[in-house]
Amino acid sequence: MEKINSINQKAWVVAVSMGYGHQRTAYPLKYLATGQKIINANDYEGIPKKDWLLWERIRKFYEFISRFKRVSIIGQASFFIFDQFQKILSFYPKRDLSKPNFSLKQIFSLIKKGWGKDLIKKLEQKPLPFITTFFTPAFMAEVFNYPGEIFCVVCDADISRSWVFLEPQKSKIKYFAPTSWAAHRLKLYGVKEENIFLTGYPLPQENLGHPPYGRVPDLEILKSDLSYRLLNLDPDKIYFRRYKVLIEEYLGSLPKNSNHPLTIMFSVGGAGVQKEIGIQIVKSLARTIGERKIKLILVAGTREKVKEYFLKNIKKLGLEDTLGKGVEIIFAQKIDDYFQRFNQALRTTDILWTKPSELSFYTALGLPIIIAPSIGSQEDFNRRWLLHLGSGIAQENPKYVHQWLFDFLESGRFAEAAMQGFIEGEKLGTFKIKKIIFNKNSVSPV
């Protein structure tokens, strides 16, 4: 295994606590952070009240509009108008897309009035590499002349113009792209090629392997988990008979029996939307859950109201005796505790059911993804990416999951999706990012 840097090399890792996406992206990079602490640009210790209030207004508006989308035609129309400001333009024909959009101009007008200056002035006292998983803190660092290097981790398969500086050719921000599509999009937006690195998305070490302090893992944990998973996803050995050589090439011989029952994880987004789908799944699979033939994990994240919604409806269905056995709810008050429990539960999860958020990239862990309806332009592109990869399966009607789920299992479709995600998905984004920051001479940009 290749050692990529010293354990003493540290950076500022900056996210925003708006939904889960940017914090989840930062979580695997936590071991790079000074004091292993991720800084939230919208809620750090000592943040000026005016900065905090501005971030809060943005967060509350986004959560409101995400939930309001479900309110008949009015909600859908309101969300459509909002989504136009973050819309991702068509890729073809290839053309110069460097002209800033309205949303970006608004962001910069606020920054030039002093938004974020306090954070940057605090961090520049120790000018470590500045890594952020959201574009606004990167812009703040650039505008207020942060003396160290500035890195921005892209957390979607494609991105809007809002991710790139007003005058991209004058910017020193370096981007870590999770897909080749995102890397090429950055070029169309005017980012210099030497500032774009195709790394893949940063995945959690605990789901890959445990090499000491930054060594590139040999994926022993991932391969072991996938070996057990395939036994549940291919009960009739349809996929195994066709692709036995391929499986053994990547994983070796499979174990005789799985170490867990067939397990589905349904994950709710940060705004709490789509929680109703989780209960539809519980209702449809109630019989097989009660017979202990299947386990369902409902992810409430850090949302107390979502947890209570799940509990209330599970009791209504008369399934409270399955809690902790056939049905598990993942909830934690602290975001790091949530991510830790989520990542641990993924190890014995066979199918991940979620909207196409940043969790789309977790398919590289050998997880087939049932794709719930997308929310926003960037999720539409994540959905396309999953379908192109062959590791995502569009959600059918959740009311009838007890029918179509088993049809897909018997055909080997889920096993195929799991292997597609594992083979085609980039797994070493976390380590590539670290190598680029601290071993610059050994890495070339796209």
Image (spheres, helix red, strand yellow):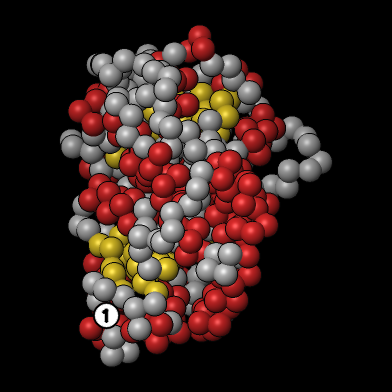
Residue 220's spot in the image, x, y percent? 40, 39
Taking 191 as reference, is 253 above or below it?
A: below
In percent of the image, x 64 and y 35: which residue is there? 180
The quadrant of the rendering that contains the C terminus is top right
Residue 66 or residue 114, whichever sits in front: 66
Residue sitting farthest toward the left: 46
Residue at image location 20% in from the left, 57% down from the top: 333
Where does the image place residue 393, in percent across and percent down from the top left? 60, 64
Q: Amino acid at mark 1?
A: Thr
In this image, 417 relative to 130: left or right? right
Identify residue for label 1: 322
Residue 93 showing in the rendered view: yes
Q: Residue at x 50, y 58 (%)?
A: 230
Taking depth in this image into account, of 403 and 5 the one nearest to the observer is 403
Q: Is residue 410 left or right of residue 110?
A: right
Q: Residue furthest right?
A: 93
Identified at 48% across, 52% down, the residue is 254
Is disc 1 placed on a helix, strand or loop?
Answer: helix
Callout 1 crowding tier (Cα within 10 Å): few <14, some 14–19, many ≥20: some
Q: Is residue 168 visible?
A: no
Quarter containing the N terminus: top left
Q: Position of residue 20 (x, y in %)?
A: 37, 52
Indicate the quadrant where residue 299 lies: bottom left
Residue 414, percent from left and from top: 57, 63
Q: In front here: 39 or 312? A: 312
Quarter assignment of residue 77: bottom right
